[in-house]
Each structure stands twice: as structure tokens, then as C-alpha cells.
Image (tube, coloured by chain):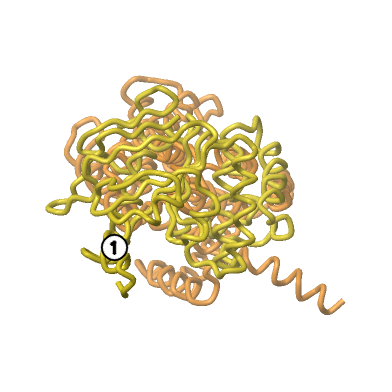
Chain colours: A orange, B yellow
Amino acid sequence: MKTPGLLALAVLLALVPLPLLVQSGFWLQFAIFTLYFALLGQSWNLLGGYGGQRSFGHAAFFGTGAYAAAVLQVDLGVNPWLCLGLAGLFGAAAGGFVGALSFRYGLRGSYFALVTLAFAEVFRIVADSVPFTGAGVGLQIPLRQTAANFQFHDKAGFYAVILALTALATAVAWWLENSRFGAELVAVRENEDAARALGIDVNRTKLWAIALSGALAGFAGSFYAQYFLYLDPRLAYGVEVSVTALLVPLIGGAGTVLGPLIGAVALRALNEISSTVTSGAPGLNLVLYGALLIAILAFLPDGLVSLIPRLYRSRLRNA
Amino acid sequence: MLEIAGISKRFGGLTAVADASLEVREGEIVALIGPNGAGKTTLFGIAAGFIPADGGSVRFAGEEILGLPPHLVARRGLVRTFQIVQPFAGLSVRENVAVGCQLHAGSRAAALGEAAEVARRVGMGDLIDRPASALTIAGRKRLELARALATKPRLLLLDEVMAGLNPTEIVELLPLVRAIRGSGVTLLLTEHVMQAVMSLAERVYVLSDGRIIAEGPPAAIVADPRVIEAYLGRGAAQRLSRGGHA
């Protein structure tokens, strides 16, 4: 499994000079959103793909990171770059909180999925009613476009940040594939009782995984806040974030390093095509998401990434 | 090495284990036999920390381990296998065994290297890169054994490793179990295959309806009227001794 990991990092490295090559704002924005999807998807992948704990409520971690970054800089004047780091911590804490409660009581499979969904909804309702999030009105981050303020006049700045964050997430997934902790996490996914019998602390392993996953989702949330400079409870804790987080790796290939990258490209492309074709009819992209998910689950249950060895093999046969 | 004393366990109205006590000394192979539903697997589950007991004590290497979670019991060197095999189905044989190796190996790479060695020891050297889901039942039983061995246990609880195997496979597995003991691992096994019990075990405990009803060397146990009655019904021993049919 070493090659795909290296390949993924090589692809990300090759993407570094992109802003110099493409002049059109459209493609740069496409690249930024794709990498942002990949980050969110990789976050889900650590927990759901490698750990087998399929969350339906990643928005709980994403939104907590986003609000942490926004509230800390707007109300307390914390530097936004520091907020990015703190958003990771808040995301990890939200993950740890949800994980501690659900793993302690042995919730698995669809029960875990439902509980995470419920947590995300509860967080949304709380964000809707407490004063410091701006409640339903939302929270605006004042516009001050300087690099020191984590706001860029040029999109290339955002591109560099999201590329670095996605590379970090990819590196974490790669590390999982080659580390003791990763092997323990996969063992837990495959069979909890057998893992226990071999000396693995199942709950601790899952807790670290959800904290790690939450940290990456928190980074994604902070990036989102800086990019759009506006948050409301539905954007931060809405179902759309959770669905994106799980759809990206499921389409690309859960439990693989490359899966979320491939899934992000596929999903963004679908998004762009659908909004062009339908001139942006609201909600239609969700219908297409659903159709794509059904098609993938029916024909490619291991995701688009499983096409790679197939193509490779058929080439060998033809050679 | 292992002292189980006065263990009881009730599941609702059903008493699975009632005041069961047994002892395994270092270097022994001890068998725990009994009819279906006697409570053997429950007792194993309690000893390995998987099932909480209602009362009693389990001492391993001189220390009380009852109440410890299973992963801590395993780290102390008491490792169980499962009667219903529990492979990491999506992983290869090597990856399966490496998870066990990780309990002691310094790094992931070292664990993967050691896993190949352990797999060879149990005769799975050729299957090392096979996915666990592609193994036959005999292969899965060996994998279960290999994974447990990989943790370098001091005491291994084997829950019906022979069940589901054909006679040839059983004969093949017997020397392996002896070799494991030869390498310094103490063994407690539950078994229905009497051929295995007779040829492996030095001492046998008989569990019936959750109670230990007899203990002794295998030859004495199979002649014990209480044991025969536990398996064949009340009065069977008497009828057998009169030369009739049970």
C-alpha cells in the first residue's frame, strides 16, 4: 500500500504551481473547492474508512472548528492563523466528546451513524440559540485582506493554504497505512472482539481516531470561515456538510489514501456540470449526489479508486 | 498459573456457570470438556475478561485478573481464541498475524516480518498473502491460532480449535498444539473431539450444567460414571457396566 500514498502526495506536490499556470479564476476556484472537499472527505475517511465508524454528522466537528475560528477572532481578537490551529483543537475536542459518549456505550454501525447525526443537529440548534454565535442572523468576519489576517486578496493565497491542509490530511492517511496505530484501527474495524483478544484497547483506538478526524474537520471549518467570512448555524452544522464528508470518500474509495482525492474531483465536477446544465436550480445537486451514490454502491462498492488496479490489469493483459 | 475459583454466572434465569473452580499449572495441557451448553465457552469468556462474572475469582500468575478488560488480560499473557473464528476478514493472513505481533514488536515493519515467521510455524507459510476471507475453515482455525501465538502468550485458551475439521485435519493439528506447549506455552483447551483430548491433555475437567463434576487424567475421566451420565443420561453408566446398551 506504499505506492498509492506516495502517488497521492506526488499529485498534491505537482499541484503547487497551479496558480501560476491557470489564469482563469474559475479553474483556481474549482481547485480550491476540490481540495476543500478532499480535506473534508479525508477527515471522514480516517474514522469511517480506516476505523469503520461511519459518521453521519461530521458537521458537528466541522462547524465547531468553524465557529471556534470565527468567534475567537471576532470576539476575542485572536490572530486568525492561531485560530486555524485552535479550530483543529476544538474539532478534536468535539470528536472526543461525541466519541467518548457513543463508544463508551458500545454504539456501532447504524446506531453510531444516527447518534452522530443527532449530535450535529443538536449543535446546530444550540448555535441557533446562544448569543455568541450570532444565532440565526449569522456571524460576519470583518473584511481585512492581509495575509497576516488569513484573508487574501488573491485566490492563490487560499489555494496554497488548502493545498497544505489537504497534503497534511493525506499524509495522516498515509501514516495510518504504515503505522501500528493504523493497523490497530483497521483491526478494530474488521473485528472488535478479535482486536480485544489480541490486546488492543478498542475504545481508546476509536477515540484517537475520532479526535484526529475531528481535528481535520475543524481545519476545514476554519478554512471555510476564512474563505466566505460568514457563518450561520445551517452552513456550519447543516446536513450538507455531513453528506459531503461521507460522500467524497465513499465515491472515491473509503479506507484508501487516494479515495478522498478522487472522490473530491468527481463530486466537484458533478457539481459544476449540474449547476451549468440546470443554471443552478437549488437542491438539484443533492438529487445528483444521491443518484451517483446509488450508482457507485451498486457497481463500484470499493469506489472509483478500485478502477485503478482494474485498468492496470487490463493493460497488462493487452500488452 | 491459572486458578479459577468459585466462578458463577447467570444470564437472566439461566445459570451458565455455577461455582466452577479449576487450576492450570505452568507447562500443562489441560482440557475442559462437557456436553453442549455446559458453560465452557462462558467460563473461557470470563477468564479472558470478555464476560463479567457474578462471583468468584480468577488468578493468573498469582494476581487477580477478574474484572480486567480483555485487552489488559491479553497484555498480561493470557490470550484466547474463538470457537466461532473471528478473522480480520478484509486483511491478508500476514496482516492478521501482524496485529498479534504488534503487542510486542517494536514497529509495524518488525511486526510484519515476525508475522511471516509465526505463519510458517503454524504451517501457513504458503498462504501468507491470501486474504483471510479466502481461507478454508481449517485455514481459519490455524489463523486464529497463529494470531494468538503471535502475541507471545504465557497461557493460551483454545476454544474448540478442532471443531469443524475433518479427521485428517485433526491429525495434522495435534502435533502443532504439542509443539506450542513445547515452546513453553501453557494450554487450556475446550474440546468436543475426544481423540484430541485423549492424546493431548494431561488432566481433564468435566463441566456439566455449569458445574465441574469431575477432574483427573483422561483415561480415568472417560471411565467415570458421573461423566458418562452427564453425556448419556441418568443410569447410562450402570447399564453400560452391565454390558447392555446405554
Label 1 resides on the chain identified as B
Q: Where residue B8 sits: x, y (%)?
A: 22, 41
> Could you say which is closer to the camera, residue A14 or residue B166?
B166
Where is residue B122? Give x, y as percent.
Answer: 66, 52
| Residue on which the image places disc 1 | B237
Q: Residue furthest front?
A: B242
Q: Is residue B115 left or right of residue B31?
A: right
The quarter of the picture where the C terminus of chain A appears is bottom right
Q: Can residue B19 be seen in this snapshot?
A: yes
Q: Is residue A129 above or below residue A84?
A: below
Q: Nearer the viewer, residue A256 or A189?
A: A189
What's the residue at 76%, 69% (across, down)? A312
Measured along the vertical axis of the image, is residue A280 above or below residue B203?
below
Residue sitting at the far bottom: A318
Q: Residue furthest left?
A: B13
* Above/below status of A123 relative to B58: below
Picture residue at 22% right of the left edge, 40% below the top = B19
Query: In the figure, residue B136 lies in which quadrant?
Result: bottom right
Which residue appears at 22% of the width and 65% of the height?
B235
| Left or right: A218 as drawn, with respect to B195 | left
Q: Amino acid at mark 1?
A: Ala
Residue A249: x, y in percent? 51, 57
Q: Secondary structure at mark 1?
A: helix
Residue A48 visible within the image? no
